[in-house]
Image (cartoon, helix red, strand yellow):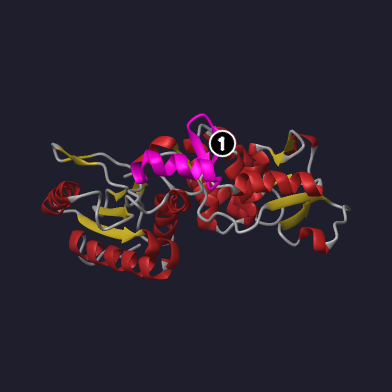
Amino acid sequence: MDVDVDVGVGVVAALVELGGVASRGQLLTATSRGEVDRALAAGDVVVLGRGRYALPSVDEARAAAHRLSACVSRISAALHWGWAVKTVPAKPVLTVPRGRRIRPSRARDVELHVATLGIDDVVDGIVTSKERTLLDCLRWEPRDSALTVADSALRDGFSRARLLAIGRDAQGPGSPQVRAVAAVADARAANPFESVLRDIALQVPGLAVVPQVSIREPDFLGRPDLVDERLRIILEADSFEWHGGRGDLARDARRYNRFVVAGWTVLRFSWEDVMFRPDEVRAILAAAVLGRTEVRCPGCPAA
């Protein structure tokens, strides 16, 4: 399901949870028209394009790149292209060509990298291309962050064939992760929260979850965030305990009850646990796999 951001949480906080970029519709659902307009007027939110909004760090990265004659890269470049990220960087992430020297005092407020950039790797002299941005994120970011960017790029229309080609052609440090993340990236992931939860699940032996699967038995029961059809395990990414009001809560309760009665195990995880306590989430998933394996196939190995 889409991330349900608590009404009143604030435009900036909503954008952070949504991965640093969001549509106007997402922000209006999370906050209100007045709050969004005030945030725009105050400069707390900037316009990426028609109906697309981001945190000011996007403009700050471009300004820093101009100041240092560098280019916006990695996670900052992902935000530039309108892709959601796991964590918005505290400083603009920039890259300069090898051999270029910049005094440390001038680069104090940025995260600066050095790399060989080809003519096709930079767009408008200021930001790495979409292909180079994906390659850098998949190579250098932690795996969950890399998967978040790759999922978002596919969701935004980047070709899966192009992504797989990036993985196939990757060489040097980090290339195994580039190929691994490219292989499992999925446009069906609704947001960074789901991407990070799926990355945790991918590390659990015996668990094979797929995003946004419609379940009919035979009537339509719902379309959970992540589903392992073999083990009949559902993972739900729940941003907040309350989903807008009593009516929403009642609908959620009925929905989850239908799954349980039909023989599914439903596990619900908070944004805070998935983002900041992944080991605990992984342990819960491993225990669920063990329990479901024993129920569905006594004596079978969990993996």
* Quarter of the figure with the C terminus: bottom left
At which x and y percent is residue 299? 23, 67
Q: Is residue 181 left or right of residue 118?
A: left
At which x and y percent is residue 163? 57, 38
Observer able to see residue 250: yes
Q: Front-most of 213 and 10?
A: 10
Q: Is residue 102 above or below residue 219?
A: below
Crowd band around label 1 with a 10 angstrom C-alpha radius: few (<14), some (14–19), many (20+): many
Q: Is residue 33 magenta?
A: yes
- Element on which disc 1 rests: strand
The residue under the point 51% across, 50% down is 147
Q: Is residue 265 above or below residue 150?
A: below
Observer able to see residue 186: no
Q: Which residues lie in the magenta part?
A: 29-53
Amino acid at circle 1: Leu
> Which residue does the numbered mark 1 point to in the structure image?
48
* Quarter of the figure with the N terminus: top left
Which quadrant would residue 221 be assigned to in this image?
Answer: top left
At which x and y percent is residue 53? 51, 39
Q: Front-most of 150 and 2?
A: 2
Q: Is residue 125 left or right of residue 192?
A: right
Q: Is residue 169 magenta?
A: no
